[in-house]
Image (cartoon, rainbow, N blue to C red):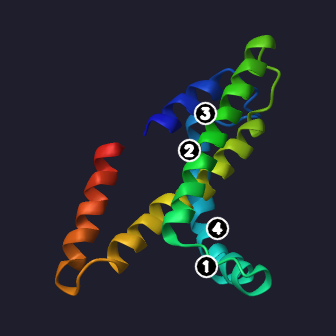
Amino acid sequence: DQQSSVWTLQATRMNLHGFQPEQLNIINPIEIMLFLPLFEQLIYPTLRKTFGIQSSPLRRMGWGMILSAVSFFLSGLLETWIQTTDNTISVFWQLPQITILAVAEIFVSVTGLEFAYATSPERLKAFMTGLYLVTTSVGN
């Protein structure tokens, strides 16, 4: 997808500490796999019980889109910083934008798939899930 190729190019102009720029692309899926159970088992229930915040799927998707924008804003700030220095910035400065995007993907992609399945009529659940995944693949 577009984000990983641009961020890979960004990483080529940073201090890589022995890593290859392409190796950083593994961080996002790992974070999603680690964060997803954390959100489902801890964060969402804590928000409901402690703070009384009942987040609807559409509200979570909205927050995910906002977090995506924040992630790309941080990427732009980092790019500005890179252009003012000469390969002295650590590639680990990409971790905040990668992490925020992983959380955004949980809010948008995972919640969107759950929403498509939950709101579909019984006979159309598989079709609607497939349709949602096709739209995701077209976007990538």
Residue at horizontal 22 percent and vertical 76 percent from the top: 126
Dot 2 falls on a residue whose secondary structure is helix
Q: Amino acid at mark 3?
A: Pro
Which of the two labelled residues, at mark 4 and mark 3, occupies the earlier sequence position? 3
Q: Residues within 10 Å of mark 2 (few under 14, many from 20)?
A: some
Which of the two labelled residues, at mark 2 and mark 4, occupies the earlier sequence position? 2
Which of the two labelled residues, at mark 3 and mark 1, occupies the earlier sequence position? 3
Residue ID for mark 2: 25
- Residue 91 quadrant: top right
User: What is the C-alpha distance between the residues marked 1 and 4?
Assistant: 9 Å
Q: Position of residue 93 (x, y in %)?
A: 77, 37
Asked if disc 2 and disc 1 are in contact, CB closer than 8 Å, the reply is: no
Residue ID for mark 3: 21
106 on left or right of 132: right
User: What is the C-alpha distance between the residues marked 2 and 4?
Assistant: 16 Å
User: What is the C-alpha distance between the residues marked 2 and 3?
Assistant: 8 Å
Dot 1 falls on a residue whose secondary structure is helix
Eye-nearest disc, 3 or 1: 1
Residue ID for mark 1: 40
Residue at horizontal 79 percent and vertical 12 percent from the top: 84
Q: Residues within 10 Å of mark 3 (few under 14, many from 20)?
A: some
- Residue 75 quadrant: top right
- Residue 64 quadrant: bottom right
Eye-nearest disc, 4 or 3: 4
76 lies above or below 92:
above
133 lies above or below 118:
above
User: What is the C-alpha distance between the residues marked 4 and 3?
Assistant: 23 Å
Q: Amino acid at mark 4?
A: Phe
Asked if disc 1 and disc 4 are in contact, CB closer than 8 Å, the reply is: no
Residue at horizontal 49 percent and vertical 65 percent from the top: 58
Residue ID for mark 4: 35
Q: Amino acid at mark 1?
A: Glu
